[in-house]
Amino acid sequence: MVEPWMAPFVGTALILCAVALLKFVKARAEQGGQVAEQSRLLEQRLAEVERRLTDIQEVVLAIDEKLEHLEMKQAKE
């Protein structure tokens, strides 16, 4: 058992441990929020890249169709 004169020290130690645990949990929660924010930003960037890739693909297809049309026209002549 704890000696009566040690009770305040044990209580203080328990309070310090509880505060440290609380700060640790709070820091982990904030870090998780940062990870979620980074994930959201990455998803936005990937969506933008995908949109640009689609635009480029459409341009390439249009050029291909024009070249094909030109080749067919030259083959007829």
Image (cartoon, grey):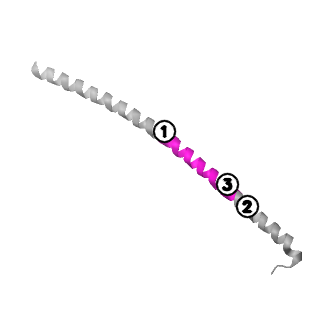
Where disc 1 sits, the SS reads: helix
Residue furthest top as drawn: 77
- Highlighted magenta segment, given as a residue range: 23-43
In this view, the residue farthest toward the left is 76
Q: Earlier in the sequence, mark 1 or mark 3?
A: 3
Say which element carries label 3.
helix
Q: What residue type is labelled 1?
A: Gln
Residue 56 location (% of width, % of height): 35, 31
Q: Which residue is drawn at 36% across and 30% down?
A: 55
Residue in the image at 63% along x and 55% along y: 28
Name the one closer to the observer, 22 or 27. 22
Residue identifier under label 3: 26
Q: Which mark is residue 20?
A: 2
Tell me the SS state at disc 2.
Answer: helix
Is residue 4 in the magenta section? no
Quick one: quadrant of the N terminus? bottom right
> Residue at the location (23% across, 26% down)?
65
- State the residue lying farthest toward the right: 5
Q: In this view, does 5 lie above or below 53?
A: below
The image quadrant where one finds the C terminus is: top left
Q: Name the residue under label 1.
A: 44
Q: Is residue 23 above or below residue 68?
A: below
Q: Please state which of residues 53 and 1 is positioned toward the viewer in this rendering.
A: 1
Q: Which of marks 1 and 2 is nearer the N terminus?
A: 2
Amino acid type at image mark 3: Lys
> In which image quadrant can residue 7 be found?
bottom right
